[in-house]
Image (cartoon, rainbow, N blue to C red):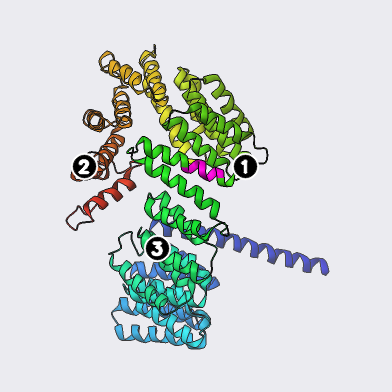
Amino acid sequence: MMYRLLVVLFALYSLNVFAQGGDAEKESLAKQYYNLGDFEKANQLYGELYDAYQGNNYYKFYRTTLLELGYYDEAEKLSKKHFKRYNQGSTLVELGEVYQLQGDLKKSEEAFDQAIDVIRDFPNQVYQIATAFTKAGEIQRALDAYLLARKLNSRNNYSFQVADIYSQLGRMEDMFREYISLLDVNPNYLQSVKNILSRSISDDPENENNLLLKRLVLSEVQGGGPEIYTDLLIWLYVQEKSYSSALRQVKALDKRSNGDQSRVYELANTCKNNQAFDIAIEAYDYIIEVGDDSPYYLDARIGKLRVFQDRIIGKNQYTEEDLHRLENEYNATLGEFGYNEFTVLLMRDLAHLQAFYMAKPDTAMGLLDRAIAIGTADRKDIARCKLELADILLLEDYVWDAILLYGQVEKEFSEDVLGQEAKFRRARVSYFQGDFNWAKAQLDVLKSSTSKLISNDAMKLSLLISDNTALDTTEAAMLEYARADFLSYQNQYESALEILEGMEFVYSGHSLIDEVLFKQGEIHSNLRNFERAAEKYAQVLTNYSFDLLADDAAFQLGWLYENHLNDKEKASEYYEKIIVDYPSSVYIVEARKRYRSIRGDRTDTKEEL
């Protein structure tokens, strides 16, 4: 008897499994029909599945197929049946949507009102109901749903959802107020709020949204609100690049809260990176005036020196007096803080200035030897000093000594960006020496570098080699160009120009000529022959407009006319050319920023700019 019972149970179990397997196949087939847009067949299958299981997922697909086929009466019956079974307010919203399609707006409004009423009894359904309203295009009702739920339980403020709906409705002031209120309740959301607000503002201080947000936040700050509002205001000023206003707020906040100058130091670095040098110096000076009680005192002294160096050298407008004054500042700082593990990178920066700009390579190498000998210094800082020393050795034509140092750093930091940088510089030496195959092999490895800068530099040099050696079995032109490039690196500009000018005539039809012209432009710019530099860049842009260097030439022309040839109008034309003709250029962001700066974001500029 027991045996027969087990047989019957096993048979029933097998039939159930078989049926479930059949339903799984049916569901898969229904989904295929649905995705293909064959709603008639999908409707039949989903109808059978819903009748068998009444699940939410089957309901969703079954209802959609009914609507797609225009079977509104059946969809109405389905939604009523599903609501009766599960009592979900979102189903009432869907029922109201069906009534809309049937043209019965009165019943639609009643269904929507009933959905809102469900929240009074079941507040936890607000997300599903509001989402259903949003999908149905009833944005205001979605807002009503959240506001009712908030009223019923103030601990659940739904600020992110409410703010997002205000944004969809175009009620920007209400959206901003919502986020400001959220920060008052929970300051931990500051970064999230900043991330969201960044989509609604721009870098234009006169943008309507910027002005609105500023007014609201300033009102909180001036009303004695908590620090978080000042923090938000500072962030807004930084987005607009209104660094002077940002610094004023940062200093006030630091004084008011008896701070540690961390915010001031962070802003100083931001200003430095964005070439707002005067504001950066003012910020560093604030920290320096606090004195060595500030944990950022040494960092501020070093940062200020680097700003001076960037400002002096960046636009190539310095005098010998400027360089000597900066060198004296470096030496004074090192005299105050000593030659130790904390000032190793300061020593490196000074050495770079002395070797590459002041023709003091021996002094520079001696300083770097002293830095490298500091046993307590960070290994990476020592490696950075070795790379600088190798660069100077290469400058002085001690090629094999430079290769040895590059190799040391590459070996010690083989898995680090420092090692990749050393590898790139070593490959560049091989290129200078004419060993193109080996250099290209190393550069191709570096194309996947974690450092975007190294990756881009490696790709650029690799392309230079491959594009200009593939069809030239003698590699004669490439050898001459590499020699001129090396002489340019060594600041032997006249010798480099002599080679390049000769190449223009000897290899007039060679694929290298755009590179030859561009390199001449670089050298003339370094020699401050700015008009001659502009001529060479213009030749590249005119004769090789579809080649890789065209956008580079356009940007350099814009830069020259903006900063050295005193023709802002012409500068803006070249920046505009990048925006219009070379939209995928690496210079596109900077070109657009400079174009707008020159034009003052006039309303008569092209829409796409």
Residue closest to the eye, 360 or 375: 360
Look at the numbered disc 2 and give the secondary structure of its residue: loop
- Please tell me the numbered disc located at residue 576: none
Which residue is drawn at the image coordinates 59% and 24% (left, top)?
404
- Dot placed on the residue nearer the N-terminal end, 2 or 3: 3
Which residue is drawn at the image coordinates 23% and 55% (left, top)?
600
User: Image quarter for residue 5?
Assistant: bottom right
Task: Tell me if mark 1 has few (under 14), some (14-19) or many (20+) residues whose alpha carbon lies within 10 angstroms of its own.
Answer: some
Judge whether 480 appears above or below 24 on screen: above
- Please tell me the numbered disc located at residue 566: 2
Judge whether 202 appears above or below 423 on screen: below
Magenta-drawn segment: 329-335
- Which residue is denoted by mark 3 in the rendering? 246
> What secondary structure is the stretch in magenta mostly built from?
helix
- Dot placed on the residue nearer the N-terminal end, 1 or 2: 1
Judge whether 223 appears above or below 462 on screen: below
Which residue is drawn at the image coordinates 47% and 69% (left, top)?
253
What percent of the width, then of the height, locates residue 55?
53, 72
At label 2, which amino acid type do we have? Asn
Residue closest to the eye, 585 or 375: 375
- Which residue is denoted by mark 1 in the rendering? 340
Residue closest to the eye, 141 or 454: 454
Q: Are marks 2 and 3 in contact (CB under 8 Å)?
A: no
At label 1, which amino acid type do we have? Asn
